[in-house]
Image: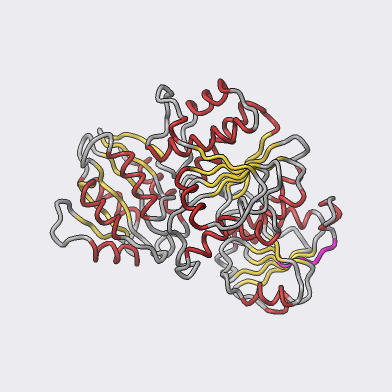
Amino acid sequence: METNYKTFFKGKKITMLGLGLLGRGVNVAKFLAELGADLTITDLKSKDLLAPSVKQLSKFKNIQFVLGEHRLKDFQKCDMVIKSAGVPLDSPYIAEARKNDIPVEMDASLFAKFTPATIVGVTGTRGKSTVAHLIYHILEHAYSKHVFLGGNVRGMATLPLLKKTKIGDIIVLELDSWQLQGFGDARLSPHVAVFTNFYPDHLNYYQGDMKKYFNDKANIFKYQNEGEVSIFGELAAKEIKTRFKGDTQGDVIVARKGVVPASWKLKIPGEHNRANIACAIAVCKELDVSDKIIKAGVESFVGVPGRLEFLREVQGVRYYNDTTATTPDGNRVALEALENKKKNSIVLIAGGADKNLDYTSMARLLHKTVKGLVLIEGAATEKLLALIPKKTSYPVYIVSSMKDAVEAARDFAQKGDTILLSPGAASFGVFKNEFDRGDQFVKLVEKIK
């Protein structure tokens, strides 16, 4: 592939599969249009729904939109297809592109092909956001202007960072399983790969096949070269040993949470976060950051919005936003982290849409930890209700909006309690996405007097 991205994209006929509303698709489109690419952007969402995104691109004459549908012809005679995260595994449009020998690319992996910077990639079912942001936070203290953050970060497109990154820079990419499909297609892995842990997730997308889910995740390390390094959390290391039968060229380090000194004053709670911190420490040591800077960075890190994020305390009730806990395992680590502070003091807001996951363990844990349960309607909620005994030691409310959820939780919470949004389920149906769910919760909590 040509190494000068400015000339590579100029005049190319590119079909973008997916625009979305979070800003990532818009920023990729702007970048390509400014470089002179001829873009066709296609999305199943309607023109009305996508109006905010389309408006931001209205000045570009080299963009045409196909909204509310996809057309096979847009995948037959282009130079490249760039697909967004979450495009179905069996998409007939991606199959059509491949049948016509058209390269299929993704934002983050396409960036990786061109950037001269050192790439630190972070994945895992849980913890990847915290680890990526913590690494970035520490490296910013160490190297100032030479560090960037990209990948699965809200509203951020990675490809435009080609305009900023240069030799000697470091970019930290949070990579979900979908983005890692692009790395697999490109047969690329980051220079430093981090795999935090592996639990059941996205089984609605992977049609119940954990092997497919793992194989996408494993692209984080499987194409490394000699001299590169993989850092596995303890939980990931066990799963990888069982599930991955191939050989890799990179060195392997297992990050054990015992390396985090007990004397360090951490601002992010929970044993799961000690495991996350261990991964970040291992990366920073590999990048020659001093122990002093690592300690200062870890102790000053306050966490990531939406990840067990403390919002405020009102009338003795503490509020936490953990909207990104979209699986039972995500919910578990939040309950375990906060339960340690005071037994049976959590009023939990949970439930929502199902990702074909098992809710048996979550139902058992609720019985042991919560004093009140508010469930937002959806298929996951129905699963939970079927597993929760009809006579419980705590009240259960079913609601259809975040406003009703917060009001129900407040009615039951008393001084010394915690109201925790940690759904253990997906957001679609009632909310636009998990960020919308968290945003609504945060705004309602901010209004409480």
Q: Is 293 displayed left or right of 350 in the figure?
A: right
Of residues 60 and 203, which is closer to you in this image?
203
Find residue 426 and report its horizontal and vertical position in percent: 42, 59
Find residue 276 and report its horizontal and vertical position in percent: 47, 39
Q: Is residue 291 above or below residue 135?
A: above
Overall secondary structure of the magenta section: strand
Q: Is residue 78 above or below residue 317?
A: below
Residue at 52%, 40% (x, y): give it.
Answer: 254
Q: Is residue 366 above or below residue 268?
A: below
Of residues 336 and 149, which is closer to you in this image?
336
Image quarter for residue 168? Answer: top right
Image quarter for residue 401? Answer: bottom left
Find residue 411 and report its horizontal and vertical position in percent: 21, 47
Image quarter for residue 443? Answer: top left
Which region of the structure is painted magenta?
A: 11-15
Reply yes or no: does residue 219 show up in magenta.
Answer: no
Q: Quadrant of the C terminus?
A: top left
